[in-house]
Image (cartoon, rainbow, N blue to C red):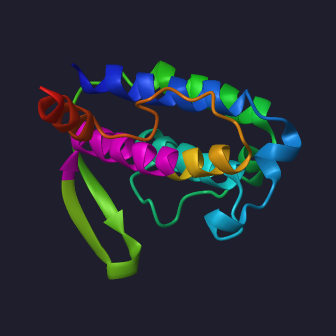
Amino acid sequence: MELHVEGEKRLKQLSESITKLSSYEYNQKIEFLSNATIGQHTRHIIELFLQLFSGYDYDNRKREIRLQKNIGYAVKTIEIIISKLRKENKELMVMCCQHETVIKSNFERELLFNIEHCIHHQAIIKIGFLHLNKMELNDDYGVAKSTIANSNKCVR
């Protein structure tokens, strides 16, 4: 599977999941998430993906609170990201502010990082859904492809 297809799949899952929430649920602080909200985790995912198109400095990204407060705005932003995922692989220089260094990378490696990062936060969001008694998520929501493949091997 091409990376952009996997990225699109995961982002669509995220978008579909948050549309199942009320604004209150999206913004509710959840004790099991260290009092974070599903909206905050969604914002974090979106912001890192946005860095693929506006620079590669994940530490100094713009924190846009509207993404964590407004489901509709988050969904529209996810749609924009999806429309930009199919890009030519090219060499990049990734800024690492905390360590004052620059690291060579490429677009596909950064896309893979963002997909895995998204899956990680989806697993956290899934905990929030369980807390809210929202059981409407796909079985692979928040589960890495390698985990799914390993589980399928063990079942055989």
For the residue pair 28 and 68, the one nearer the viewer reads as: 28
Expressed as whole percent of the image width and height from the top left, the position of residue 28 reads 81, 54
Residue 152, above or below 31: above
The answer to whether residue 90 of the structure is visible from this angle is no
Secondary structure predominantly adopted by residues drawn in magenta:
helix
| Residue at the (60%, 53%) spot, across then down | 41
In the image, residue 136 lies at what x, y percent?
Answer: 63, 27
Residue 93 lies, in percent from the top left, at: 26, 55
Q: Is residue 26 left or right of residue 62?
A: right
| Vertical side of 103 occupied by 76: above or below | above
**Which quadrant holds the N terminus?**
top left
Q: Residue at x 23, y 20 (%)?
A: 2
Q: In front here: 114 or 97? A: 114
Q: Judge by depth and name the residue closer to the eye, 70 or 77.
A: 70
Indicate the position of residue 42 as horizontal and vertical percent values.
Answer: 62, 46
| Residue 41 appears anywhere in the view | yes
Residue 127 shown left or right of residue 30 in the figure: left
Q: Residue at x 86, y 40 (%)?
A: 23
What residue span does the magenta drawing correspond to?
Answer: 105-123
Where on the picture, by quarter, is residue 109?
A: top left
Q: Residue furthest bottom?
A: 99
Q: How many marks?
A: 0
- Position of the C terminus by quadrant: top left
Residue at the far front in the pictured view: 156
Q: Left or right: 64 with respect to 87?
A: right
Instruction: Check if residue 121 falls in the magenta segment.
Output: yes
Please name the residue shown 43% across and 22% down the image: 9
Q: Quadrant of residue 130?
A: top right
